[in-house]
């Protein structure tokens, strides 16, 4: 991304990245297009934004048609990210949910055993990732299960167990994919592909929170403060940080301090 974009552009881009619906994504892309500086150096960026808007508008038309038929199916997002498991039959999706998400889904050699989405929560060293197992893919899947593809379109990552033999054309315009060979290799691969870091919060004089925030790489103390409470920014004084991003433990930092994976942040504010 060009370094000379406006603060308004960056704010709109952040909202776009966090948007969970197609309509929201279009809205914030339009804000990005309206606030990006108009000169030769940003022509490529403007073209990319316009292309994304066009694709999302086509997707929105499809979603509205499905909605009129009562075919849109959704799973409320929880945790720091939502991941969909997508694969051919008997490749270990149910095994993964049982082993890593604490579910008790019957796992058999019978193909297409999963007939509806199953939802679990993956604990990755304190960060919670929601995992949605979809019915196994086959030719014509998009026609039979258009409702389930509405989940895929709004999730943060599609994980495909197996190899290139999976009919990826069934995913249409969905581009955020990660192919893993076996379920046991998936946990690390999922976290890596999400591009997140774990940041723990701590109240002054209190214990470190057990559950971590999942923030994008390059996140700052300001991002942590916004996650805790938007009004916190108005009262912010300073933060103390423990971890790899500071020179010494408990270092006092400001809002623009860039955090690293595993950092602990203690926020201080005016009362």
Image (cartoon, helix red, strand yellow):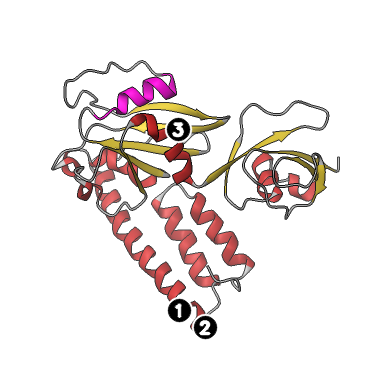
Q: Secondary structure at mark 3?
A: strand
Q: Is residue 40 left or right of residue 177?
A: right
Would you say residue 85 is visible in this rendering? yes
> Is 93 in the magenta?
yes
- List the residue tagged with mark 1: 43
Say few, some or many: other residues with alpha carbon within 10 Å of mark 2 (under 14 / 14 to 19 / 20 or more).
few
In this view, which residue lies farthest toward the left? 139
> Which quadrant of the view contains residue 53?
bottom left
Confirm or deny contact between disc 2 and disc 1 (CB under 8 A). yes
Q: Position of residue 7 (x, y in %)?
A: 64, 66
Q: Whole-Å distance between the Cαs marked 2 and 1? A: 7 Å
What is the span of residues highlighted in magenta in the rendered image?
Answer: 91-102
Q: Residue at x 40, y 73 (%)?
A: 47
Q: Residue at x 78, y 52 (%)?
A: 254
Confirm or deny contact between disc 1 and disc 3 (CB under 8 A). no
Q: Residue at x 22, y 33 (%)?
A: 136
């Amino acid at each position: 991304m060009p370094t000379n974009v406006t603060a308004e552009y960056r704010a709109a881009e952040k909202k776009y990245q966090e948007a969970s619906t197609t309509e929201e994504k279009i809205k914030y892309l339009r804000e990005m297009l309206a606030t990006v500086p108009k000169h030769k150096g940003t022509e490529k960026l403007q073209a990319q934004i316009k292309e994304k808007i066009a694709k999302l508008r086509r997707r929105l038309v499809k979603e509205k048609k499905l909605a009129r038929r009562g075919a849109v199916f959704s799973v409320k997002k929880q945790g720091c990210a939502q991941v969909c498991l997508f694969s051919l039959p008997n490749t270990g999706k149910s095994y993964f949910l049982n082993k890593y998400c604490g579910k008790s889904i019957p796992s058999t050699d019978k193909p297409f055993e999963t007939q509806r989405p199953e939802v679990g929560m993956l604990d990755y060293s304190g960060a919670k990732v929601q995992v949605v197992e979809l019915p196994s893919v086959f030719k014509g899947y998009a026609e039979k299960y258009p409702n389930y593809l509405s989940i895929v379109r709004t999730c943060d990552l599609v994980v495909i167990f197996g190899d290139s033999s999976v009919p990826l054309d069934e995913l249409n315009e969905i581009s955020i994919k990660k192919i893993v060979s076996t379920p046991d290799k998936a946990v690390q691969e999922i976290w890596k592909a999400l591009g997140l870091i774990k940041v723990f919060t701590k109240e002054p004089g209190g214990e470190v929170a057990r559950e971590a925030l999942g923030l994008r790489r390059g996140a700052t103390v300001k991002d942590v403060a916004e996650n805790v409470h938007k009004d916190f920014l108005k009262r912010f004084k300073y933060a103390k940080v423990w971890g790899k991003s500071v020179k010494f433990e408990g270092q006092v930092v400001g809002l623009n301090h860039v955090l690293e994976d595993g950092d602990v942040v203690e926020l201080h504010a005016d009362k």
